[in-house]
Image (tube, rainbow, N blue to C red):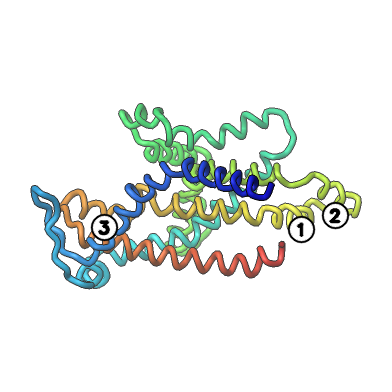
Amino acid sequence: MKKKNLSIERRNSRNGFLFVLPWLLGVVMFFLVPLVQSVVFSFSKVTPTTSGFDMSFVGLENYKYALYESPEYVNHFLECLSDFGYKIPIILILSLILAVMLNGKFKGRTFFRSLFFVPVIIAGSVVMTIIDAGASVEELGEVAQSAYLDGLINFEKLFTQLGLPAEATTLIFGYVDQIFDLVWQCGVQTVLFISGLQAIPEQLYEVSKVEGATKWEEFWYITVPMLGHTIVLVLVFTIIEFCVRADNPVIEQAYSLLIGNQVYGKSTAMLWIFFVVIAAITGAIFLVFKKLCLDRWS
């Protein structure tokens, strides 16, 4: 009986391996190989030829160029880090608030859930091709954003009349000007949070009501702790989406060198610097979040 059980386990293991084999081959061929090749490019001077690439090792020259010689890279990098520092928390908080609201029981709930997922449907489907014939999704968003801000409330005039310094007015209006864009980016995150909210046992809220807990206490002592792992998932997705956005200035500069001028070494070095720094910041965020939140909630 024991040998039969082992045989079944081995057969199941073999079937499982065969099931994921295409995925493993895809990862090796289309991810790991290009990844290693990009690392080699970042330390080399790459010259395209008719037979492939002619590479000569240059050490850290490409990284020195990106950090010390490129006139725009450091500024673009700091701009990206600044956006990372305030956009990621806003998207997380906003999507969680929207998810809590949309998870409630009210008429038209399905319609409003779909409404917040429309940007994702447009950006990731054939609709995008149709839109590209006229205006891009970003341009449509900017048009709608401008119409909203100019037509509903003139925020720039309002801030000016408050007597604030010109620098403060410009800074505040810049943040307000991006509200529409941030809401536009909350579609997937909101859906993920709704999925996490629906997995929370209703018995916990029933017990809290019996104990006389308020909605605010339920949110902080039940909802947020039970969404701990969902928050990690949403954070990972948001960071990846933020880093690969088409309007990322670091990505734009690197791609302009890569595609426009075929400068493979310097462009890959720029991307690797960006990746390593973002990965380090993300790792630090996860460690702090795990120590301060997940360990206490578990």
- Direction left: furthest residue: 50
Label 3 residue SS: helix
Give left or right: position of 214 versus 255.
Answer: right
Query: Looking at numbered disc 3 in the image, what kind of residue is underneath it?
Result: Gln
Q: Residue 115, percent across and down?
A: 56, 33
> Mark 3 highlights which residue?
37
Q: Are marks 3 and 2 in contact (CB under 8 Å)?
A: no
Label 1 residue SS: helix
The span from disc 3 to disc 2 (Cα, nearest Å) is 57 Å
Residue in the picture at 79% in, 56% down = 217
> Mark 2 highlights which residue?
213
Residue in the picture at 68% in, 66% down = 295
Give left or right: position of 222 versus 162.
Answer: right
- Closer to the observer: label 3 or label 1? 3
User: Tag 2 or tag 3, which sits nearer the N-term?
Assistant: 3
Query: Looking at numbered disc 1 in the image, what kind of residue is underneath it?
Result: Tyr
The span from disc 3 to disc 1 (Cα, nearest Å) is 48 Å
- Closer to the observer: label 3 or label 2? 3
User: Tag 1 or tag 2, which sits nearer the N-term?
Assistant: 2
> Mark 1 highlights which residue?
221
- Closer to the observer: label 2 or label 1? 1
Label 2 residue SS: loop
User: Tag 1 or tag 3, which sits nearer the N-term?
Assistant: 3
Residue sitting nearer the eye, 292 or 26: 26
Q: Are marks 2 and 1 in contact (CB under 8 Å)?
A: yes
The span from disc 2 to disc 1 (Cα, nearest Å) is 10 Å
- The crowding category of the residue bearing disc 3, from other C-alpha atoms within 10 Å (few below 14, some 14 to 19, many at least 20), is few
